């Protein structure tokens, strides 16, 4: 293969691997599943001024997302994780009677997620690589056989730490002031845009990374008849 063709093939393989980023995070539908219940909560709370009504409305929408995915035989991973978070936030808010507590589990999860991302990068097991490896077919070959991709996954993971870390930095002070309206609207506003930015930055990093080395697949022998 001539150098130009080899370079074109390398770029195509890198782009194909980079394009898995959106898939790994549930696509646009997954982001909607995670964002709309928070919007429904704050709208319902402003209309009814009742924590329980707002909590049940958000929980009902999350459950509806799960049912819709099941009916279409789609993966419920992101919808189910969303309904779990909404259910926990709804339970805490109804127990305390404080509307702002609906957002507390999400804020704590975001802090824990950023800590886990940072720890994985420091341990040379960057979480972005762990998540994307099975999707790209490389599994964990990037750790020992492809140092360029290890570096790219590490860089992408640190990018997620910085971008996603901005959310709790902005939202936790609002939570402590008990300003439910501002907290709720900002939580919705900071739902999808930072996620899209983090995915775009990851996509750009992986476009310039070496293509993945596919993990070997053992061919299973057919049993003797």
Image: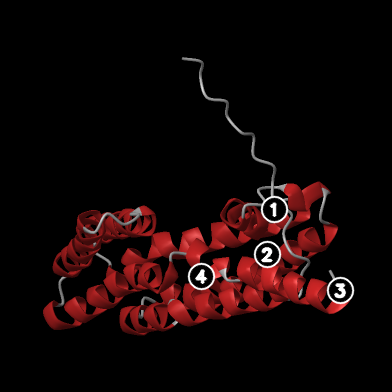
Compute the Cα span from label 1 to label 2. Answer: 8 Å
* Percent x, y of residue 89: 32, 59
**Residue 4 visible, this orientation:** yes
Q: Is residue 197 above or below residue 216?
A: below
* Percent x, y of residue 119: 70, 53
Compute the Cα span from label 3 to label 2. Answer: 35 Å
Left or right of 5 in this view: 201: left
Q: Residue at x 60, y 62 (%)?
A: 114
Identify the residue under disc 4: 22
Asked whether the residues under the numbered discs 1 and 2 touch, taking CB atoms below 8 Å apart as contact, a structural biologist would say: yes
**Of 55 and 132, the residue lying toward us:** 132
Rate crowding at label 4 as few (under 14), some (14 to 19) or many (20 or more) other CA atoms within 10 Å: some
Please tell me which of labels 3 and 4 falls first in the chain. Answer: 3
* Percent x, y of residue 87: 27, 55
Please tell me which of labels 4 and 2 falls first in the chain. Answer: 4
Identify the residue under disc 3: 2
Q: Residue at x 33, y 59 (%)?
A: 79
Identify the residue under disc 2: 157
Q: Quadrant of the N terminus?
A: bottom right
């Amino acid at each position: 293969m001539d150098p130009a063709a080899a370079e074109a093939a390398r770029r195509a393989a890198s782009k194909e691997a980079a394009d898995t980023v959106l898939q790994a995070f549930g696509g646009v539908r997954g982001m909607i599943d995670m964002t709309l219940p928070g919007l429904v909560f704050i709208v319902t709370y402003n209309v009814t001024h009742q924590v329980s009504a707002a909590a049940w409305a958000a929980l009902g929408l999350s459950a509806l997302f799960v049912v819709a995915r099941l009916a279409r035989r789609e993966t419920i991973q992101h919808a189910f994780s969303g309904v779990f978070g909404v259910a926990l936030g709804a339970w805490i808010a109804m127990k305390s009677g404080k509307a702002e507590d609906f957002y507390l589990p999400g804020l704590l999860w975001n802090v824990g997620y950023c800590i886990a991302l940072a720890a994985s990068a420091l341990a040379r097991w960057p979480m972005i690589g762990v998540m994307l490896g099975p999707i790209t077919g490389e599994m964990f070959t990037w750790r020992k056989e492809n140092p360029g991709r290890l570096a790219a996954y590490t860089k992408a993971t640190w990018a997620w730490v910085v971008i996603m870390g901005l959310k709790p930095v902005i939202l936790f002070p609002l939570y402590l002031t008990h300003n439910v309206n501002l907290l709720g609207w900002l939580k919705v506003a900071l739902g999808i845009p930072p996620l899209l930015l983090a995915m775009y930055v990851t996509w750009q990093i992986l476009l310039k990374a070496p293509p993945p080395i596919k993990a070997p697949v053992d061919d299973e022998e057919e049993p003797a008849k």
